[in-house]
Image (spheres, rainbow, N blue to C red):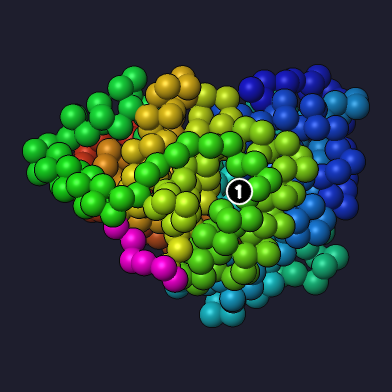
Amino acid sequence: MNVLRAPTAVAIGSRVHPDAHGIDSAAWDRLVGADNFYGSHRWVRSTHLASGGDPVVTASAAGVLLGVLPTWPGEGGGDEMFSLPGILPGMAAADGGRQLWLGTRRSVRNELLCVRGPQRRPVLRALLGRALDLASDRGDDGVVMAYLAGEDALELAAAHPRARALLHSADTYLPVPPGGAGELSARADQHSRTRRRSEMRAFQRTGTVIKTVRPTEDIVPRIAYLIAQNRARHGSPGGPQVVLDALNAQRATGLLDDAVAFLGLRGTDLVAATLCYGHGDRLYARYFGYDYTGTAPTNEYFLLTYHAPLDYAAECGFRRYRTAISAWDVKVRRGARLTPLAAVVLPLRGAVCTPARQREHNITVAGRWRELARTHPLAMGPEWACWDSPLP
């Protein structure tokens, strides 16, 4: 837990590192919370090995690391998930300008790597100020930290008077029941149970067998091939080699030691795979892949991304299974909880919107999420209250 404290009288200094390599990994990971797997030193370091180093901003006092803020250049207009107009249509200029993105490269869930206690606000202010300086030096128009856990977004925005926290997405997770997927299905209504049984029967008719394995060197290239097909189907850039480079970098940093692969096999043919990672008592679903060149999918996503991982999580003592963004309605119907994700936007000059426009935007977007979960009230927890009420 990030509970490290430093004397309030000690001056906080900030600096920019060329990448994560030279930063003490133990000091970094002391700032990593229970739900901040993608902020861990190993994960950020793996992205630098795979894609080239990105600057990392740090804040320290008296030789103690108090805060870390990874950065990366974003995807511009080529990828709606990682461009300002893509995640905040109507709030950003059509071209979005050039933003320095804060947080882990291509992460769809960020949390702040920062101490708790009286030093937290000054440390966040120091990190954000140095990030703005870096953006100015690079010729960017400002900074944005997207896919940021809701509470953290409000804290980061409060560290600068021109920063705005704007709701734009939602993360999903499932509390892991002791009985795994079977117990979760048993809690569902009759219609949902009937639908789950139908999906299972259709899957079984394909003859596909599920196997749970560690992602060893011999199987990783085959998994990368499937993941690349799925990414291409949904408009994400990069072919099999890009995915394989990322997975090999994860092996180099030890991440794959805590990973597990759920494979769909038809005979000796690998047709589908889901890759998950353990972090404390959390299990994270990160990649799904399918061989669309061979056959049409028949509920492999459901079986390999819900059923098998939930059973595995229950057996291994995980308490929460994070299933990330996208397909929210499908996930909510299967018992997932929604948690708010927001972007903190801070231009070099001025503000992206007025405080009144910020409140209007957040109330409207939160209302859409409540409508999505209208028939599943347990999907929306109390953390949404500050986003859909007209608080100052």
- Find numbered disc 1 in the image and state the secondary structure of the residue it sits on: loop
Frontmost residue, 82 versus 50:
50
Q: Is residue 322 above or below residue 56?
A: above
Q: Quadrant of the N terminus?
A: top right
- The amino acid type of the residue labelled 1 equals Ile
Direction from residue 62 to residue 243 in the image, left or right: left
Pick the front one: 33 or 91: 33
Q: Quadrant of residue 252?
A: top right
Q: Main secondary structure of the magenta part?
A: loop
Q: Is residue 12 visible?
A: no
Magenta range: 293-298
Task: Residue at 68%, 38% (x, y): give it.
Answer: 255
Residue under label 1: 219
Q: Could you tell me residue 243's position as x and y percent? A: 64, 59
> From the viewer's perspective, is 269 left or right of 83?
left
- The image shows residue 126 at horizontal and vertical percentages of 77, 43
Q: Dividing the picture into quarters, in which one does residue 200 lie?
A: top left
Instruction: Please determine whether, in this image, residue 112 is positioned above or below residue 243.
Output: above
Q: Please give the name of the residue rendered at 73% of the width and 21% of the height, measured from the top-left corner.
A: 4
Q: Position of residue 197 (x, y in %)?
A: 17, 42
Q: Is residue 153 above or below residue 10?
A: below
**Which residue sits furthest left?**
190
Residue 21 lies, in percent from the top left, at 86, 43
Seen from this angle, which residue lies furthest front?
267
Residue 212 falls within the magenta-colored stretch: no
Q: Residues within 10 Å of mark 1 (few under 14, many from 20)?
A: some
Q: Residue at x 45, y 63 (%)?
A: 291
